[in-house]
Image: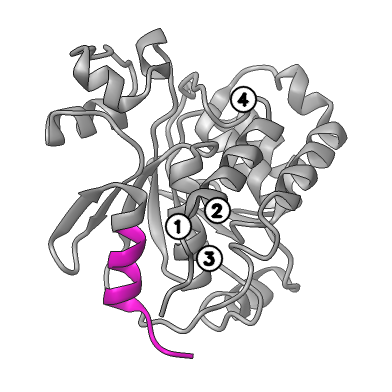
Amino acid sequence: MKILKLGPINFASSVLATLVRTGGGISSKSAALKPEMPLKLFDMEGCPYCRLVREALTELDLDAEIYPCPKQGERYRIYVIEKGGKAQFPFLIDPNTGAEIYESLIIIKYLFEIYGQRQLPLKWQLGPLQTVGSMLASTARPGLGITKKASIAPEQLLELYSFESSPYARLVRECLCEMEIPYMLRNCGRTELGEWVLPTLRDALKIVPNSELKNRKILQAKTGRMAIPYLVDPNENVEMFESTKIVDYLETTYGLDD
């Protein structure tokens, strides 16, 4: 089963989605308070409202357990209906406070108040404009990261080192969503100038940015380099870079013929 054809046109449209969002979901300023228990976000990768929440998670350097709820999905959509009363996404559950929240802009305000502990940035105060921009970004990837594909559910959560607007990571997240594979999202936003240099050029020039973010430090120490996306699958004891390799691995390991 091949969910995504990772050709030049497909990648170009992912880059376009990133450009439409004009830098949203790339840079991070770490939240003042980090949750003791993981946040749980029920979302659809291709949903423009869900994208806004994931951008805020990157900007606050907050990790979250992602439970994909594509259309026709059977694993987590029923749970959201039981908990919140309707199949609407995004839906955030915070086990640290007991909060259960629908509506992207309400979720973002909550994240900045509880964990950022700072004033809501102007861009999010102009929330309706961000919603329009996110809708435009979704038009670059029509139908992707939305509809369920048959798959086997892994026993343990996968881990994905990512930041929201990475065009490479988006391809992997779309695949995970369509296959209804839950994962721990390890946000790796940029904080240093050197992190804006392409990984291949950074490696060639031996540039090692001194990031202040925990996940980037962990990934650098673990692999000796910093590139996004990076997948960890504890079920198969597999870890890897490169979106094409990751998608092929996911399809081969967990995919089923429809």
What range is drawn magenta here?
Answer: 246-258
The N terminus sits in image quarter: bottom left
Residue type, mark 4 in image: Gly
Q: CA distance from mark 4 to mark 1?
A: 23 Å
User: Which mark, by number, is residue 10?
Assistant: 2
Work out whether mark 4 precedes mark 3 in sequence or the reverse, and give the earlier one.
4
Residue type, mark 3 in image: Pro
The residue tagged 3 is 68
Q: Nearer the viewer, residue 81 or 51?
A: 51
Q: CA distance from mark 2 to mark 4?
A: 20 Å
User: Which mark, by number, is residue 234?
Assistant: none
> Pointer 1 and pointer 2: residues touching (CB < 8 Å)?
yes
The residue tagged 4 is 23
Q: CA distance from mark 4 to mark 3?
A: 24 Å
Q: Residue at x 63, y 43 (%)?
A: 53
Which residue, as the protein is rendered here, is positioned at the far front?
Answer: 8
Q: Secondary structure at mark 3?
A: strand
> Pointer 1 and pointer 3: residues touching (CB < 8 Å)?
no
| Crowd band around label 4 with a 10 angstrom C-alpha radius: few (<14), some (14–19), many (20+) | few
